[in-house]
Image (cartoon, grey):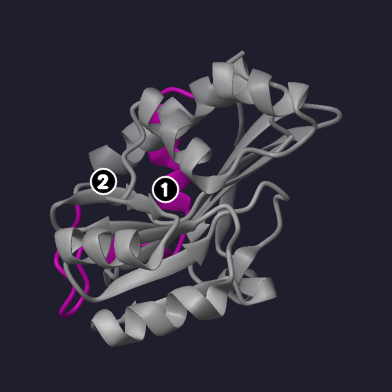
Amino acid sequence: MHRIIERALREGRFPTEPECREILEDYGIPVLEYAVAKSEEEAVRVAEEIGYPVVMKIVTAKGEHKSDIGGVLLNIKDKDELIKSFRELKAPMGVLISPMVSGVELLIGAFQDEQFGGVVAFGTGGKFAEVYEDVAYRITPIDADTAMEMIRETKVYRILSGYRDVKARDINQIVKVLVNLSKLVEENPEIREIDLNPTFSLPEGVFVGDARFIL
């Protein structure tokens, strides 16, 4: 069991997003650049280091969808807007700040099924993921060949392969993420659900943009 999962269980809470990102990085799953700010001054420094525009999200240990409770603010363009947004979020545990990026949005996740055990999911991500319902599933553990099969089953595969003004992406990097996620699930069955939506497929790589673990 990962030390962060063990600590969260001991404290009777869910991992915060920064903790989720740390776990993902430990398993070789890349995440967007980020830092946590607990004051306006710290938030300004972080945003200037990352570069505007940025995304701001509350840090919480309750496991809820942050967007559902008004805990996500997008496309913050300058210092004045950043300070106003920091005050608006009212986040006792701090605010996570990441760059605002645009890319092919993927749904990557996993869950524990009562009958089959660990299951990994891949498909079209973003806020309309539940509308498109473009998702492939496999029981863990999975290898690279199985991960590639999953990707090819989805409609988003056509976009990832290169479509109109969208250049082809490095699908092998997505394969690695799915295989590493499978390993994470196998080694940490205490995690009942992993939601990495959106994960961005960018020309320079694949990066998790939001992470939520349910124990």
| Residue 103 position by quadrant | bottom left
The residue under label 1 is which amino acid type?
Ile
Give the SS element for disc 2.
Answer: helix
Relative to 99, does residue 13 appear above or below in the rendering? above
Q: CA distance from mark 2 to mark 1?
A: 8 Å
Residue range of the region highlighted in magenta in the rendering: 142-169
* Up-down relation of residue 197 to residue 139 (above or below): below
Marks 2 and 1, the one that precedes in the sequence: 1
Determine whether the residue tagged by mark 1 lies in a helix, strand or loop: helix
- Give the labeled residue for mark 1: 151
Inspect this view and state whether residue 73 appears. no
Residue 128 in which image quadrant: bottom right
Residue closest to the eye, 214 or 78: 78
In the depicted view, which residue is nearer to us: 147 or 18? 18
Residue under circle 2?
A: 171
Q: Position of residue 110 (x, y in %)?
A: 61, 39
> In the image, residue 43 lies at what x, y percent?
33, 63
Is 194 positioned to the left or the right of 168 in the image?
right
